[in-house]
Image (spheres, rainbow, N blue to C red):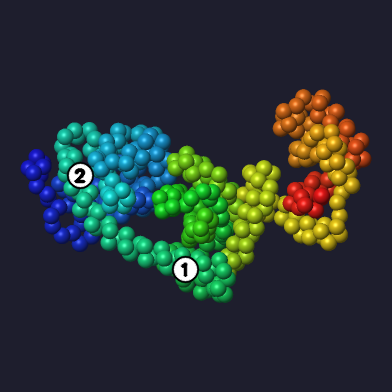
Amino acid sequence: MNSLNKANPFQRKFDNLEQFADFLSEIIHCPVTIEDANHRLLAYSSHDNKTDAARVATIIGRRVPEKVINRLWKDGVIPALNKQDEPVIIPEIDDIGLGDRVAVAIRKGSEVLGYIWIVEAAHKGDQVDRNLLTLASEKAKKLLLHVSRQKVKREKDYQELFWELLTGNIHSHDEAVDRLSSITPSVPPCFSVMAFQIQGKLDDSIHKKITYLINTQQQVKVLLHTLDDRLLLLLASTSEESNSLSSINNFALLFLKQLKERFRIENVRAACSSIQEGDLTKTAFAYQEALSALSIKQQFPEETNDIVFYHDLGVFRYLNGLLEQRRDENHTHPGLRKLREYDSKNNTELYDTLETYLNRDGNINEAAKDLHVHVNTLNYRVKRICEIAQIDVKNPHYKLSLYLEIKLERLDPKHNL
């Protein structure tokens, strides 16, 4: 092994990454795996019967298990690999089935193309030469660049296909299935168009981080994805219709959480279409649902913050239609008008108090917490509101109509003047 410190054994031609992985494994006498930047398995050498569960799962699934990726992020391993050229030693992490490792990033300048993982090597001390792994990384870069060029071309083709589906320019389900056959051999039983509105500047670095999260999660299958300015669009499917809602909802929430925790990307708004079954030509319809959901969430951020699916937005889906009718009738609610006038003359906030009270469906304790006032204070305010506006907040039908009127007034404040 020491004789290799003064030479470069990789100054030879390799036909593919598999050949390179086997060659490196023979030199260092340890199993080797090579992953792309999204932890998908590209090549691996043989191993004996004593290998660990994480390696077996990676080979079987052709990707690193999500629980392993998450743990390596939490322990700072992946951030360290992404920042430095030198190999990183990873001690055994028994609860995720990961034995001792030495890993090095394969990079082109500051861009990480992939990783080389040496299995069961940390305990071997200086037998794994650091310089040797650095040389291996440099050789792997050349092999990965060829793979990367092919990948870029495929992704461009996939994005064109996605936009054809989103805009309704593929009119046949069979044609859509045929075009998707290079990505997945089977038609998804159900799917949803997911939309994430990203605030702030969206540069190439952010794009890569977002793509990384999409490709490393394993809760749903993302068939296609694209970025449109600051709007991230996904065509996501699940294997089982029975849990499709929970799977997609959980993925959306985890995606937002990981964007914030790993990359400090915050204030991202998420919306999903209803679950569509079978026919892929429904993608265009689902796309419009997702866009509508985003628009509604932008109009009512507090009320809809925890809602992901279009169909769960309930009455908010109909407000724009009701707004047009309200404008046609030139209608304003007399009780609410009185409250606004009273607030203006007396420097009070009874109108906002009523909205908070209705947002909490009349729950006086929860509304008092939101308003940071004592329950007795709020009870008094509600009583005054009913007297001034001549309304009945105990009647459920009247309460619902007031709730809708207030939301419509929020949408069209100039109409109330």
Which of pointers 2 and 1 lies earlier in the amino acid sequence? 2
* Amino acid type, mark 2: Leu
At x 63%, y 44%, the residue is: 306
| Quadrant holding the N terminus | top left
At x 32%, y 63%, the residue is: 149
To which residue does mark 2 refer? 133
Q: Is residue 311 left or right of residue 148?
A: right
Mark linked to residue 160: 1
User: Mark 2, mark 1: which one is toward the viewer?
Assistant: 1
SS at badge 1: helix
Classify 263 as above or below 37.
Answer: above
Tell me the CA gap for discs 2 and 1.
Answer: 39 Å
SS at badge 2: helix
At x 74%, y 51%, the residue is: 411
Q: Is residue 368 left or right of residue 94?
A: right
Q: Residues within 10 Å of mark 1 (few under 14, many from 20)?
A: few
Which of the two residues, 219 or 108, is positioned nearer the viewer here?
108
Residue 191: x, y in percent? 56, 59
Which of the two residues, 216 or 202, is positioned nearer the viewer here?
202
At x 40%, y 46%, the residue is: 65
* Residue 254 appears in the rendering: no
